[in-house]
Image (spheres, rainbow, N blue to C red):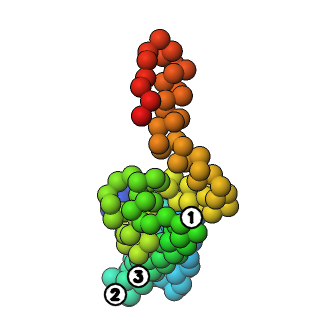
Amino acid sequence: MNARQCMSCGTQEAMQHFERRSLTVDYKNVSRWVHDIAGWECKACGEIIFDNDTDSAERYSDAGDKLLEECFQVMGAEMKRIRRKLHLTQKEAVKLLSGGGHNAFSRYERGELPPPQPLFNLMRLLDRHPHLLAEIHAINDGTDLRRLLAAHFPEQETAQA
Ligand SMILES: [Zn+2]
């Protein structure tokens, strides 16, 4: 097959055909191989277009979907395990840890949505140091905020709740 013009960077005769190549699909720092890919690659900019007359595009896209689905599932299972370990209902977990919609935790745990990275980090930390939940309670119940306010604006009088 002859070289073609790249539709991405416009370089003439830059697209070269390849077959039987292995590419990765990636999510965060997780990568998975997809083998036996055929397509065209631009020598100038690296743009890759899959061969239409093979199943390369479909297999690559399926592998990406599968990786995402599996990542969401394992993260969801972890969220559920840790929440239960902390003796929180989904509703309590939303109020205390995530904010947002009341069914947010339910959707994370079912793997429908990935938990936001800060929330997932928090859950992992609470898994290792569950006693820190008491500090989160203190932060949320306003004790912490009252202390900060008093330090920054000592002249203001704040009524105790
Ligand atoms: Zn190009």
**Depth check: 8 or 56 in front?**
56
**Which numbered disc flags the more N-terminal residue, 1 or 3?**
3
Asked whether disc 2 touches disc 1, contact meaning CB atoms under 8 Å apart, the reply is no
How far apart marks 3 and 2 lie (CA) works out to: 17 Å
Regarding residue 64, the answer to whether it shows in the image is no
Three-letter code for the amino acid on which mark 2 is drawn: Asp
Report x, y in % for residue 119: 50, 56
Q: Foreground mark, 2 or 1? A: 1
Q: Foreground mark, 3 or 2? A: 3
Look at mark 1 in the image and give the residue it sits on. 86
Look at mark 3 in the image and give the residue it sits on. 62
**Which numbered disc flags the more N-terminal residue, 2 or 1?**
2
Could you say whether the residue bearing mark 1 is in a helix, strand or loop? loop
**Depth check: 34 or 48 in front?**
34
**Depth check: 3 or 143 in front?**
143
Quarter of the C terminus within the rendering:
top left
Look at mark 2 in the image and give the residue it sits on. 53
